[in-house]
């Protein structure tokens, strides 16, 4: 009933820190209505990033958690680490056929090549990808009235736009670079790259000579993630004991969990007019 809801909400607000002690990887943004967004910049293969996500959610007791995932990658939230580790290492003919069926030949091949990059890191480090998102999902479920949103652009859209941005020879050159990726990576490399996510840094190095590809894979998704974070940061209506009581709204608190490479773009776009229909 309304009394129980009010009690739960009061407990949550009491747990929320006025001046939260946050990791250095967290950027605080404020919406026009006073809602606060805490963006945790993560390295996708990092134990420290998992801890940063847990600490931030426990400190601020958010109303919404937004993660850099789309519906096509949501399965990684509920799979156990062992299964994810096995799946991340396996790039089979069946996976290739499924990617081609879903996204077309060129986009499907691009998806498999990017999976190869992720599989290379997975094999080198023995860590399953997306650990910070699974921690965010688990912690959000412990916070009363906390919603969990997927904030990334659908991956087939990103691949199709990326392929369309490249000439034939650029596609060949990029595929060649991805196919022969073999540099060893240590856990220290990951933590050293925490300010610029390792997976995104490797991709940036490979696509550096293709500015249009960087635009579709990084810059456009910065805009999309910013839009989704702003949508989540809406004023919250408090529960009422009866319909006769006036409605009362308060600023919301949001935690965003994104790759560190997206944080500068989100900060840059935070106060600008955005039109995601164009992307």
Image (cartoon, rainbow, N blue to C red):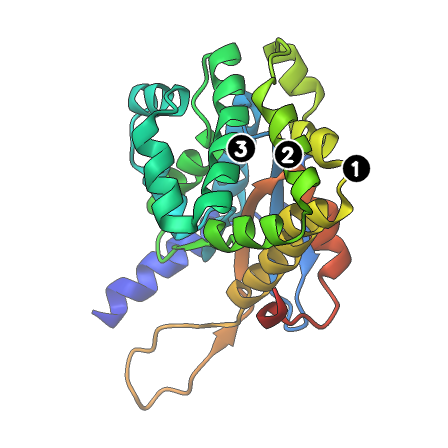
Local packing at callout 2 (Cα closer than 10 Å; few below 14, some 14-19, many 20+) is few
Marks 3,2: beta carbons within 8 A: no
Front-lying residue, 81 or 98? 98
The residue under the point 45% across, 38% down is 133
Image quadrant containing the C terminus: bottom right
Mark 2 or 1, nearer chain start:
2
Name the element at disc 2. helix
Q: Are marks 3 and 1 in contact (CB under 8 Å)?
A: no
Which image quadrant is residue 89 in?
top left
Q: Which residue is denoted by mark 2 in the rendering?
A: 172
Q: Nearer the viewer, residue 259 or 221?
A: 221
Left/right of residue 243 with respect to residue 111 in the rendered view: left
Q: Position of residue 19 (x, y in %)?
A: 64, 47
Mark 3 / mark 2, whichever is N-terminal: 3
Camera-nearest label, 3 or 2 = 2
Q: Label 3, label 1: how many angstroms apart (C-alpha)?
A: 17 Å
- Which residue position is annotated with label 1? 209
Q: Is residue 78 at least partly visible in the picture? A: yes
Mark 1 surroundings within 10 Å by alpha-carbon count, few (fewer than 14), some (14 through 19), many (20 or more): few
Q: Could you tell me residue 272's position as x and y percent?
A: 75, 68
Dot 3: within a 10 Å radius of its alpha carbon, few (fewer than 14), some, or many (20 or more) residues?
Answer: some
Distance between the Cα atoms at labels 3 and 2? 14 Å
Rounded to the nearest whole Å, what is the CA distance between mark 2 and mark 1?
13 Å
Q: Earlier in the sequence, mark 3 or mark 1?
A: 3
Residue 278 placement: quadrant = bottom right
SS at circle 3 = helix
Residue 23 in sight from this viewpoint = no
Task: Note whether 4 is above or below 210 in the view shown.
Answer: below
Which residue appears at 60% of the width and 26% of the height?
178
Residue 17 horizontal side relative to residue 9, left or right: right
**Residue 71 in the image, given as x and y percentages of width and height:** 38, 51
Q: Which residue is mark 3?
A: 114
């Amino acid at each position: 009933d309304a009394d129980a809801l009010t009690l739960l909400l009061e407990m949550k607000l009491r747990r929320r820190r006025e001046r939260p002690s946050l990791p250095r990887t967290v950027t605080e943004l404020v919406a026009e209505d006073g809602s606060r967004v805490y963006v945790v910049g993560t390295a996708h293969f990092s134990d420290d990033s998992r801890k940063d996500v847990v600490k931030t959610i426990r400190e601020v007791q958010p109303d919404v958690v937004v993660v850099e995932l789309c519906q096509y990658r949501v399965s990684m939230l509920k799979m156990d680490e062992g299964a994810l580790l096995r799946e991340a290492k396996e790039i089979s003919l069946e996976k290739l056929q499924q990617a081609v069926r879903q996204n077309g030949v060129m986009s499907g091949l691009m998806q498999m090549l990017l999976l190869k990059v992720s599989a290379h890191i997975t094999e080198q480090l023995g860590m399953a990808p997306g650990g910070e998102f699974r921690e965010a999902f688990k912690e959000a479920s412990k916070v009363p009235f906390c919603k969990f949103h997927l904030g990334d652009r659908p991956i087939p859209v990103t691949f199709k736009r990326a392929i369309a941005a490249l000439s034939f020879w650029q596609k060949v050159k990029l595929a060649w670079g991805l196919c022969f990726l073999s540099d060893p990576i240590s856990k220290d490399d990951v933590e050293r790259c925490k300010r610029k996510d390792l997976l995104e840094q490797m991709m940036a190095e490979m696509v550096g000579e293709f500015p249009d590809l960087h635009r579709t894979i990084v810059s456009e998704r910065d805009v999309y993630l910013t839009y989704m974070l702003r949508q989540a940061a809406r004023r919250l209506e408090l529960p009422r004991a009866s319909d006769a009581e006036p409605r009362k709204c308060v600023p919301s608190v949001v935690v965003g969990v994104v790759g560190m490479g997206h944080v500068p773009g989100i900060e840059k776009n935070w106060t600008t007019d955005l039109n995601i229909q164009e992307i």
